[in-house]
Amino acid sequence: MPELHPGLVILFGSGETSPNGGRIFESVARRLAGHLRAVILETPAGFELNSAQVAGRIANFLRQRLQNYQPEITIIPARKRNTSFSPDDSELIRPLLQSNLIFLGPGSPTYAVRQLYESRAWHTLVARHRQGATIVMASAATIACTEHSQANESHQAL
């Protein structure tokens, strides 16, 4: 059995679609083995009416900036638990299983934690990272993964 190595974790406070952010994504793309298969999880912005547009802008940025790598980019609208866009829906999150770059970004840190904590999407993301996928978090997602994120009474972070 081949030895597995966790992937990179890239944290942006903001600026993920800036020229400097683009250079970081290019650096990541160069390091990935095989074809670039990126997934964008909408979850942190899932409460917003325009969450699809937020994720779409990031996808368009990555398609343009990483065009030399011919990226396959999938947006997963895992917006809210107990809906048809649930982060616990195994069919909806299936693209995570083949991804080698996973992005979570703008929105609300507390909303992200409430929707992703102990979810199938989160457990799959963690498993993919342990298998070598790079995780990129920006803005709200970066805050959501800190120990001090306060999403509920138990003060759990992702």
Image (tube, helix red, strand yellow):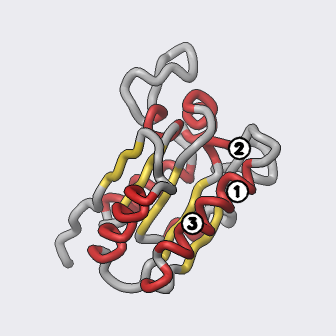
Q: Is residue 111 left or right of residue 137?
A: right
Labels in figure, total: 3
Ranked by sequence position, the earlier of labels 3 and 1 is 3
| Residue 69 appears left or right of 87 | left
Query: Which residue is found at the position 44% from the left and 79% from the top?
Result: 36
- How many residues crowd around disc 2 within 10 Å: few (fewer than 14), some, or many (20 or more)? many
Q: Position of residue 94 (x, y in %)?
A: 60, 68
x, y percent for residue 108: 61, 33
Q: Quadrant of the C terminus?
A: top left
Q: Nearer the viewer, residue 105 or 121?
A: 105
In the rendered structure, which disc, 3 or 2, sits on the residue that comes first in sequence? 2
Residue placed under numbered mark 1 in the picture: 77
- SS for tag 3? helix
Question: Is the residue under label 1 in contact with that under label 2 (CB below 8 Å)?
Answer: yes
Query: Which residue corresponds to mark 3?
Result: 61
Q: What mark, if any, has residue 135 been given in the picture?
A: none
Disc ID at residue 46 = 2
Q: As drawn, which residue projects farthest toward the left?
A: 3
Residue 40 quadrant: bottom right
Where is residue 134? Give x, y as percent.
36, 62
Q: What residue lies at 44% left-to-right and 48% top-to-bottom?
A: 137
Q: Quadrant of the N terminus?
A: bottom left
* Amino acid found under the numbered disc labelled 2: Gly
Instruction: Please name the residue shown 22% across and 68% down the image.
Output: 4
Q: Nearer the viewer, residue 91 or 56?
A: 56
